[in-house]
Amino acid sequence: MAQRHGYLGSMRLTYSALAAFTACCVAIGVFWLSLSFFQYEEETKARGRLSLYRSTVVSELERFSHLTYVLARDSHVIDTATGAATGRLDRRLAAFAAQSGLDAIYLMRPDGMTVSASNAGKSDSFVGQDYSFRPYFQQARNGTQGRFYGIGATTGLPGYFIADAVRLPDETLIGVIAIKLDLTDLEEAWRAAGEQVLLANRDGVIMLSSDPDWRYRTLQDLDSAQRARIAQDRQFPGQRLEPLDWADNKDARAMIGGAERIHLSASVPPHDWVLHYFADDSAAMTRSWLLTGMVMILAGTGFLVSQVRRTQRIGEALRRSEAEEAQLREANERLAVEIEERRAAERRLKRTQNELERASRLAALGQLAASVTHELGQPIAAMRNHLAAAEIGGQRAERILPRISGIVDRMEAITRQLKFFARTDREDFSQVDLRAVVQSALALVEPNIEKIGVEVTFIQPKHPILVRGNQLRLEQVLTNILRNAVDSVEDCHIRQIALSLGGCDGTGWVEICDSGHGLGQASLDDLQEPFVTTRESGRGMGLGLAISANIVKEHHGRISARNGTNSGAVFRVELPLADRDEDLSAA
């Protein structure tokens, strides 16, 4: 007893340990799944924010891209570029800049010297300054719209520069008109939204940032060629361009400012600039812990409830056990009776099948009786004529006997065709040539074929198609199908029956096509039911296909039927070839 209690205690400890381990696995799984889901949500939100900020930057860059093109064709600008006084243009440009919110609009000579500007007369005026070293000036002079971001050489304030060439109607270059945009409002918007955003140029230099400490840092080390080009263009004068303390961890994650963040980026046209967006997803971790805790609480509550219900079910099961045992004994007794009744029903079904086969043969025999009487009447009349001629003419026996012997052979062949209709025993299976089976079946229904004038075509291979079976029973199958085909075309204008046979993939087959009325809405399963027929009343008992299906099944074959392409029906009988490794003699 003590050992039993010790065993039960050990089982309870094992069960408790297993339950605790399962709970831990579930908690870990819930946590990681929920964390992945919430992080995906945060990443989706971040992509939306990045798309919004990218659109804002692109819109800001393109907002005044057309202005330099328009100003380059303004008559006041052209007059000033060709030597007119600058005062009127200075006032005009100042008005344009004030109304559009631009930092400056200024006109330069072909050598880069500024001759007129919206800030003329101010301490930080561009007038008199040479900007020929700027890439935007060189691009405009070469025939394309110049664009450039950098720290102003005169004001020391960063800006985005756009420039277009001023030309005479004959395309003579007379100057370059440029505008300067202040993009620092973008930084203010990012900071106000509490976002971590930076915009870097193609060299990886941060031009705009929500964090002022990141501005003019680099995302990667600059080589000497990059630094030389930046110095030549005076793009970021006075800036050390030191690398930013960050690391791209791939998979949309990065370390920046000592913390891991969601990191997404997008290119900004028309330059090779990249907008970087960093998002904090710590809320996803918090939500995952909360969800895991709730799941574990619910799981614990469910476990307690299930244990209470389990105890109740065990008690109910114990109370039902004796009643169920008595019911089981009673059910076993009823089952034994049902088994015996089923066996008796199977024996009756077997007898019924045999009777159906016999009835089918008798039905066929009745239909053939008239034809056989007609066929036998001719040779009998011939014999009588030969005997009368011999008696009158005094012919010798050796001359008349061969004729009478031939007539007797013909009569024997006619009667031999009817043998299998009277047989009830089951003969052993042997090798049977399907060609011979088809020929015998055609001979049996030949009187019916000739009576209504059916055109029969028979396509057969030159080599035997050998199957294992009982030839007489297979003849009965094909005779039934052929009789059905003859009856089907009797009332048709075109009376044709086509037979073909062959063998492939271990199966021999016979296919019979007629030009009759077809199967209609009936299926092969319907036609295999005893006493079901598509012929009018009095033209058949509906047993032929039912018997034929059973015979083919005994031969381990299959029979199928379908409506023809244009009209009529197509019946196909498939039987295993004789070389298959199976003992069909037990069928």
Image (cartoon, helix red, strand yellow):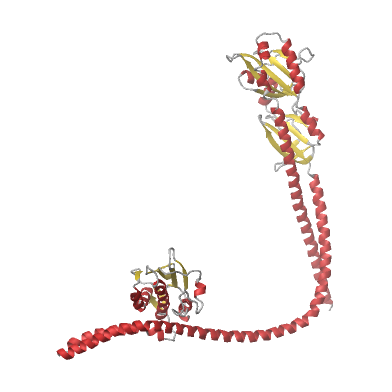
364 or 257, which is in the foreground? 364
Place residue 62 in its image quadrant: top right
Q: Say left or right for 37 vs 551.
A: right
Q: Is residue 194 above or below residue 39?
A: above
Give me the residue at 81% from left, 46% from top: 283
Depth check: give the residue in front, 112 or 563. 563
Quadrant position of the N terminus in the picture: bottom right
Q: Is residue 492 left or right of residue 129?
A: left
Q: Is residue 452 visible?
A: yes
Judged left or right of residue 587, residue 328 is right
What residue is at 50 percent from the left and 72 percent from the top? Answer: 524
Residue at figure coordinates x 67%, y 8% from the top left: 83
Up/down of 272 relative to 504, above or below: above
Q: Position of residue 96 (x, y in %)?
A: 74, 19
Please provide percent x and percent y for residue 422.
41, 86
Q: Is residue 397 visible?
A: no
Side of 530 relative to 5 (left or right) = left
User: Closer to the camera, 59 or 46?
Assistant: 59
